[in-house]
Amino acid sequence: MARIYSWNIRGLNWPNKQEDVKVFLHEKNIGLVRLLETKVKEKNVDKIASKIFQGWNWHHNFNLSTKERIWVAWQLSLYVVHIIFMADQLIHCKVTQVQVMKQFYLTVIYGANQEAGRRLLWEGLIAIANNMDELGVSLETLTLSSTKEIE
């Protein structure tokens, strides 16, 4: 079974780093990956993705975020991914493992650094939770800047 992996890549514009990612995904048998902080401009996504993700599909939220936050990619032979909801800090999807036809929900999160920005994230997560009737998995990166409770 292929693995699911989460990686804060901190930039994916250099060809050497693109090749490193491609080799890593292959060597570690990764079938679905979440990349954060790619810093790839939306106009360059197809060019870079075609170098890294041959035989894969991908989706990103770059059009919703000025930070190029979240990029989800999956091997077409292993997973079917249906995007349900997307915002600047999250992508929520239903994933099917093709070989065993098992399904699960996946919410990929990369939270804003500031409390005010996080309010929108929490509103989105609450909306998702209120519409869920099955269990899901969350891959998240939240940088906690305060212990103050958000009301």
Image (spheres, rainbow, N blue to C red):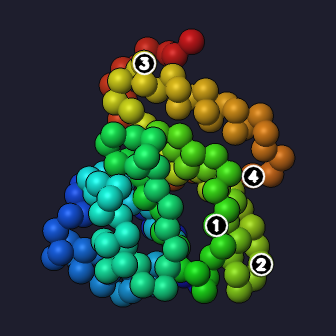
Residues marked 1 and 4 touching at CB (< 8 Å):
no
Give me the C-alpha separation between circle 4 and circle 3: 28 Å
Give me the C-alpha separation between circle 4 and circle 2: 16 Å
In the rendered image, which residue does mark 2 sit on?
Answer: 101
Q: Earlier in the sequence, mark 4 or mark 2?
A: 2
Q: Position of residue 14 (x, y in %)?
A: 16, 68
Q: Earlier in the sequence, mark 1 or mark 4?
A: 1
Location of residue 4 with respect to 6 vertically, above or below: below
Disc on res. 81:
1
Disc on res. 135:
4
Left or right placement of residue 95 versus residue 19 in this view: right
Q: Badge 4, how many Cα within 10 Å: few under 14, some, many 20+?
A: few
Say which of 149 and 22 sits in front: 22
Q: Position of residue 78 (x, y in %)?
A: 61, 82
Location of residue 146 with respect to 90 vertically, above or below: above
* Quadrant in which the C terminus appears: top right
Q: Residue 81, located in which quarter of the rendered image?
A: bottom right
Q: Amino acid at mark 3?
A: Ala
Disc on res. 116:
3
Residues marked 1 and 3 touching at CB (< 8 Å):
no
The answer to whether any part of residue 58 appears in the image is yes
Q: Residue at x 30, y 84 (%)?
A: 23
Q: Earlier in the sequence, mark 1 or mark 3?
A: 1
Location of residue 149 with respect to 2 vertically, above or below: above
The answer to whether any part of residue 31 appears in the image is no
Q: Position of residue 88 (x, y in %)?
A: 46, 39
